[in-house]
Image (cartoon, rainbow, N blue to C red):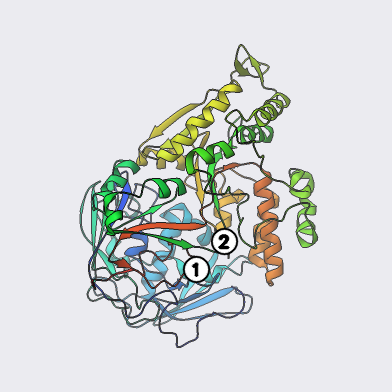
Amino acid sequence: MYGDPALPPDFVSLPYADPDAPKGGTLVDGNTGGFDSLNPFIQKGTPPWQLRFLTHESLLIRNYDEPFALYGLLAESVETDPDRKWVEFTLRPEARFSDGSPVTVEDVIWSYETLGTIGNPRYLGLWQQIDSIAQTGPRSLRITFNADNRELALIAGLRPILKKAQWEGKDFSDSGLTEVPIGSAPYVVDSFTAGRNVVLKRDPDYWGNDLPVRRGTNNADTYRIEFYGDQNVLFEAFKAGELSYLREFNAENWARDYDFPAVARGDIVKTEIPSQRPSGMTGFVMNTRQPPFDDMRVRDALLSAFNFEYINETITGGRQPRISSYFSGSQLAMQPGPAEGRVAEMLAPFADSLPPEAMTGYALPAGDGSARNRRNVGHAADLLAEAGWTVQDNVLKNVQGQPFTFEILLSQGNRQDQSIIDIYLNALARLGITPVVTAVDNAQYELRVADFDFGMTSFRRQLSLSPGNEQKLYWGSAQADQPGSRNLMGLKSPAADAMIDTMLQARSSEDFIAATRALDRILTSGRYVIPLFSYDVGRIAHVRDLTWSGKVPIYGDGVYFMPETWWFDDSP
């Protein structure tokens, strides 16, 4: 995105991969819920999320040891003009799908158009910014953009490429379990039992084995994904030796629950991996498309009533710090106190439409650590009264006598979120609020979230050191009412849109950082999400013979490179 790539033209492998890692073994992963589709590229159905990354490839691939630089995968070369108004890719002549057929320019163009028009809505944003896409040679194509967005040349290289001929005469958008998309990646679906498991095999004839970006990666011969009813059942399965590894996101669970016999014997190893990426946002999002969450005073009140300090001590033993903003923990995070310098200049034209704290400074309300959290609950009551809500006969009502109520939508089996909400309900009861808490299975949950059918629900957005076009998907006004979009809070903010555009058009790192810090202020001061714990350390419990290079990329914590660059070591 800025400057030159970190790796030289003759690099041997990605810096966190071992090019001499042995191949072999069966890696067993675990998911909760079930699945009713093997097509991860459409909106309909619930597929195993891993398939997008295991079975399909893109023209370019990331190096997770630098903020945003891409290297050739299906493409052997990439060319773009100084303003990045267009990008041209040339395919590798050896690139093949798993059925042995070559990856062609026709496949690439069809994939972009199909995903952009009838695929999952996450692909729509790029497609809308493409002016034309055309073949320029036997193995080359050019994409011309209609927007001033320097990141598009990189984003375009990350779209999955599918085989066009597979879908002739078939309905791509309704494929479910009847058709397994053919990809070019190292793994292919070997078998599956609907709703229970999917078994993938490493393609012995995978075309890209000798590429530097693939050396030392995808080392397991078999990759099996098992499905369990909820997180508790999944954890018991791991303890019983049915899974190869498990990520633990709760520091208290990590300290308390991982003392079972397999750990004591050394058969299970606990590994902690640090990360330099932003915290992102994990919490409970409020749907501003519907009252009462369209009133910021109400959102502010519910945020004040959320007793984080007490909840953190109860759930994690106080071991995990709170997320303080969307980009906290990185140089992109908003700075304490009033906006200054370039940040203030960028926000000034929108000051009248923003919460005052976007300019003067904002920090999350801090409780006293007690169970009652008296001061913050009192402040919440004051804010609600200001918004027209008062307690009448022990029930919070407006001037028309209508009770304050909303639905909290949860996914079944998420024991941590349910435990947090159970504590939160006590505080809300003291305000005269009795929400409806609904827990549904994964399939229903995904459908309801896609239709924005919730008042409050769980929320997680991982953010990078190079935020860009995906920010429009997360917070852009154009996505707010698009079913299936990731703008769950329904944010429609000209200021946020302008900061995202500035990030995408920035020619210097100084302007880019300032625009991101300004966006962080807009999002955080808008009180759209009740933040929870940060996950600055990856906690991975794994079988003893599953190992890795020990080289941690800047996008560490295991999310991105585990298990792709891990391998089974059968040495004593």
Residue at the limit of the structure toward the bottom, as seen here? 10
The amino acid type of the residue labelled 2 equals Asn
Left/right of residue 380 with respect to residue 412 in the rendered view: right
Residue 178 visible (yes or no): no
Q: Which residue is drawn at 55% across and 41% down?
A: 285
Q: Distance between the residues labelled 1 and 2?
A: 10 Å
Q: Residues within 10 Å of mark 2 (few under 14, many from 20)?
A: many
Residue 30 coordinates in the image, percent (x, y):
30, 52
Q: Is 198 rendered above or below residue 256?
A: below
Residue at the disc numbered 1: 156
Q: Residues within 10 Å of mark 1 (few under 14, many from 20)?
A: some
Q: How many marks?
A: 2
Residue at the limit of the structure toward the top, as seen here? 393
Quarter assignment of residue 531: top right
Q: Which mark is residue 469?
A: 2
Quarter assignment of residue 184: bottom left
User: In the image shown, does 464 or 140 lie closer to the viewer?
Assistant: 464
Query: Tag 1, which secondary structure?
Result: helix
Contact? badges 1 and 2 (CB < 8 Å):
no
Q: Residue at x 75, y 59 (%)?
A: 343
Quarter of the image where the N terminus is located: bottom right
Residue 78 coordinates in the image, percent (x, y):
49, 80
The amino acid type of the residue labelled 1 equals Ala
Q: Is 229 rendered above or below residue 70?
A: above
Quarter of the image where the C terminus is located: bottom left
Left/right of residue 426 with respect to residue 392 in the rendered view: left
Residue 250 visible (yes or no): yes
Mark sitting earlier along the chain (1/2): 1
Query: Tag 2, which secondary structure?
Result: loop
User: In the image shown, does 407 or 328 lie closer to the viewer?
Assistant: 328
